[in-house]
Image: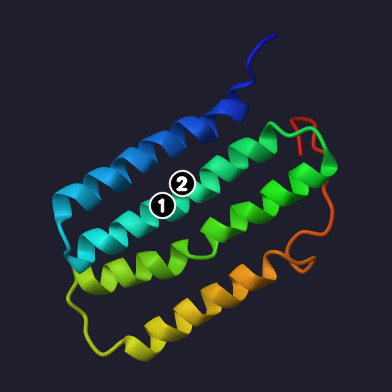
Amino acid sequence: MAIEIYKILPLISAVFMLALGIFVFLKGGKSKLSIILSLTCFSVVIWLSSTYAMFNSEKEESIIFWDRTVYAGVVFIPILIYHFSLIFTSIKNQRVILYFGYALSFLFLILSSTDYFVSEIYKYTWGY
């Protein structure tokens, strides 16, 4: 049985992102910058590890579950990167936009477990 490379790449990437997130968290102390960057890495880990699980699932229910779990990480990546950039560049007075972005991310997190995000699966030649 040959390993299909597209099925393993998300897991390999997730392992590297997890290592990066842990490294930054341990080396950065309690600085806001390192915490936000670590959270970004962990969101990417959720995305990639769920993608790996989805690619390796056989049953439709399992595929839909993992596809919805993908979004648990994905919905936070944009706001975390925005938050990181605000801290990195020392831009102040963006709290309203930042809070609004986090509120939208949590709204999308709630919606991601419904049919509004994923209601059915589509089979491509390479998988679901």
**Element type at marker 1?**
helix
Q: Position of residue 66 (x, y in %)?
A: 68, 47
For the residues labelled 2 and 1, the Cα–Cα distance comes to 5 Å
Residue at the spot of label 1: 42
- Nearer to the camera, 78 or 56: 56
* Residue at the (77%, 69%) spot, across then down: 116
- The amino acid type, in three-letter code, at marker 2 is Val
Q: Is residue 125 left or right of residue 97?
A: right
Secondary structure found at label 2:
helix
Residue holding disc 2: 45
115 to the left or right of 74? right
Picture colour scheme:
rainbow
CB contact under 8 Å: marks 2 and 1? yes
* Residue in the foreground of this view, choosing between 22 and 79: 22
Residue at screen point 54% across, 49% down: 47
- The tag on residue 30 is none
Q: Is residue 58 above or below residue 46?
A: above
Is the residue marked by circle 2 packed among few (<14), some (14-19), or many (20+) residues within 10 Å?
Answer: many
What kind of residue is marked 1?
Phe
Q: In terms of image quadrants, where is residue 28?
A: bottom left
